[in-house]
Image: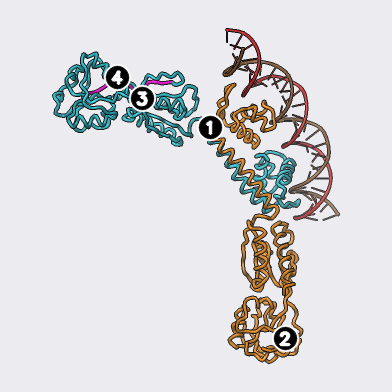
Chain colours: A orange, B cyan, C brown, D red
Amino acid sequence: MELKTLRYFVTLGEELHFGRAARRLHISQPPLSRQISRLEEEIGAKLFYRTQRHVELTPAGELLQRDASAILANVAEAMNTARRAGRGEVGKLSVGFFLGATYTLLPRILQNFRAQHPEVKLVLQEMGITQVLDAIISGEIDVGFLRPPSADPAVLTEVLLREPFVAVVPQNSRFRTAKSISLKDLADEPFIMYTPGNSILYTQIMTACHQAGFQPRIVQETRRPITMISLVRAGAGIALVTSSVQATGNKGVLFRKITGPLPMTEIAVAWRARNPSPLLQSFLKVARQAARRKSTAT
Amino acid sequence: MELKTLRYFVTLGEELHFGRAARRLHISQPPLSRQISRLEEEIGAKLFYRTQRHVELTPAGELLQRDASAILANVAEAMNTARRAGRGEVGKLSVGFFLGATYTLLPRILQNFRAQHPEVKLVLQEMGITQVLDAIISGEIDVGFLRPPSADPAVLTEVLLREPFVAVVPQNSRFRTAKSISLKDLADEPFIMYTPGNSILYTQIMTACHQAGFQPRIVQETRRPITMISLVRAGAGIALVTSSVQATGNKGVLFRKITGPLPMTEIAVAWRARNPSPLLQSFLKVARQAARRKSTAT
DNA sequence: TTTATTGATACATTTCATGCATTAATCATG
DNA sequence: CATGATTAATGCATGAAATGTATCAATAAA
C-alpha cells in the first residue's frame, strides 16, 4: 500500500470517472485502472461499482475515501511540521539559568524568542550556576546561563553581558550626595555579602577589597540580592550588587557607582558542543541580539 | 512522499542503526541510506544526526517519528475497516418499514442483525407502504418492508411472512365461546375498519365480505390496529386485524380465527435491484432466517 | 598501528508503473 | 434496428526508480 495509490483512489472517488481522474493526475487512463484494481485486490473488496458507463463508490469505498483523505492531509501536515522543525520554528527547548540572569537579560531574551518562535515550547528552570553546567553536560537542558569560566571543554560558552558592581546604600547614608564611591571608602562600613558557597561574586568582591587594602566587615550573608537591598533599607549596612539588580526597583535605597579595583562580572550563555539543533542556534542568535541592545542601553 | 519511505524512516528511528533497521526491513543497508537521505532532501531538514558511529534523531526527526507512526497505524486501520466493510461487517444501512411490520417480524430481524453485525449502524424510519417503495427507488433507504405487490421492476421483493386475519371481539361478545368465527357471521356486526387510503388490508377485507355476501357496516375508521383494539374494548364494534397484532397484548378483548374467503396478507422485504452492497445481502439473509423461524412459530 | 564496524557511494540489475494501441461493452442517435 | 461514440479493461513495450553487490571512507576499539 503506497500513498500514490491512495491519491489515485481519492481523486477517482472525487471524479467518479477514470478518464477525468487520470487527466487530473497527469497520467493516462490505463494505469489508473490498474492501480485501482490492484488496490481492490490488496484490500480484498471492491471499492467502486463500475459498469462501462458508470462509476460509483461501494460502501467500503466510501469509508476508505474518508480515511484516505484524512491520511493524505495528515501526511502533508506531518511533513510541514518536520520542515518547520528543521528551520527551528517548532519544538521544545529547555533553558536553565541562575538567579542573576533573571533581572534584565533573560526576560528580554525570552520575550524576543517567544515573539519570533511562538510555537516553540520553552521549559525554564532556575538553578545554581554549577547546576547549570551539570545540566548542560547531562543533556537535561539545551542551553544555560552562568557566570564564566566554565572548565568543561564539551560546553561552549559565550559572554553576553559585562556589568559593573554598584554599591547599595541607605537613603540617609553619608554617601547620599556622592555620584560615585571609591571602594576603599567602604572599608569601615558593615557589609551585607553574598554567601561564599556557589557565588563567584563573593570571590570577586573579597579579592577587590583586599587589593584596596582592607578586609570587609561582613554583618550578614545571603544569596539573594533582593534580600540584600531589604537589609540595606533596614539600615543593617551597605552591599555591593551587580548593576542589573537595579532593575528590580530601588525604593528606600540608593545605588552608587564604585571606583576602584572591582572588575566587571560576566553573564554567559552556554550549550553543549555538538548540538546542531536549529532551535539552539536560533536561541543563541536571539540571545546575542538582546545582549547587544542591552549592553548599549546600560 | 511514499509510505515505504515512512516505514523505512520509522524503523530506522526505532533501531537507530542502519544495518539493523535494514535487516528488519528485509533490504540491504545502502537503499536504506539512500531513501532516508532522499526523504531528508524532500523535507528539507536533517532527520538524523549521524556519524559513522552513532545515529540519533534530530528534533525534526523526533516530531516526524511520532506523526509517521500514527499515519502508518491509520493506514493499517483504514485498510482493515475497508476490508471489513467489503465483507459487510461495518457500515450503515437504512431501513424503511410500515407499521404492520413492527409487531413481530421487524423486531426479530433487527435483533438478529444487530447481534451478527454489531458495528453496522442501522437507520430506521417508519413510513407508509407507498413511501417505502418510493424511498427504495430514490435510494433514501437500502431496504424496506411493505405489502406486495410492488409494481416497479427496479425493486425486487420477497415475501417473508403470510399471516391470516383474526377477529377482535369484546370479552362479553356473543362470540366469546366460539373457537373460530365464519366471516358471514359478522355480517350484522358494526365494523371498525382500516382507513381506505393507503391500506391494502381495507381492500382485502371489503372484497372478502363481498364474496361472503354482505356489505360491512363501518362505524369507525383508523390506521392503527392498536386504536382498533381500544375501540373494540370500548364496545364500539368488532374489527379484523392481522394475526401479528396479537403480539401487542390483548387485555380486554378476544382474538378469534376467521373462516371464510379471507386471504392471507403478506409482508415482503424489498430492495433496489442492482444494489450489490454486501450489507444488504447480509440483511436479507438475516431477514429470511428470522421469517422462517417466525413462520413455523405461528 | 591495526582491525572491525558503520554509513555513504558506484554501478549493474531488476522490478514495477507507465504509455500506446486495442478490445469489449454499453448508451445515444438517426 | 443499426451505427457511432464513450468508457473501462487488457496486451505489450518502454522507462524510471529502487534494489543488491562491491567498495570506500571514517571512526572507534584493541
Q: Nearer the viewer, residue A253 or B189?
A: B189
Query: Residue B193, image x and y in percent?
Result: 25, 25
Please name the amino acid that badge 3 sits on.
Ala
**In the rendered image, which residue does mark 2 sit on?**
A180
Label 1 vs label 4: CA separation? 43 Å
- In reply to whether residue B175 is colored magenta, the answer given is no
Is label 2 in a helix, a strand or a loop? strand
**In the rendered image, which residue does mark 3 sit on?**
B291
Please name the amino acid that badge 2 sits on.
Ser
Circles 2 and 3: CB atoms closer than 8 Å: no
**In the rendered image, which residue does mark 1 sit on?**
A60
Query: Which callout, 3 or 4, points to the residue nearer the camera?
Result: 4
Please name the amino acid that badge 1 sits on.
Ala
Instruction: Name above or below for residue A130 compared with residue A263.
Output: above
Query: Which callout, 2 or 4, points to the residue nearer the camera?
Result: 4
Circle 3 chain = B
The magenta segment: B156-167
Instruction: Name above or below for residue A138 compared with residue A266.
Output: above
Label 2 vs label 4: CA separation? 117 Å
Q: Is C17 situated left or right of B168 in this image?
A: right
Mark 3: give few (<14), some (14-19) or many (20+) Cα within 10 Å.
many
**In the rendered image, which residue does mark 4 sit on?**
B203
Label 3 vs label 1: CA separation? 28 Å
* Residue A76: quarter of image: top right
User: Which residue does the image show at 67% across and 45% down from the upper left?
Assistant: B9
Circle 4 chain = B
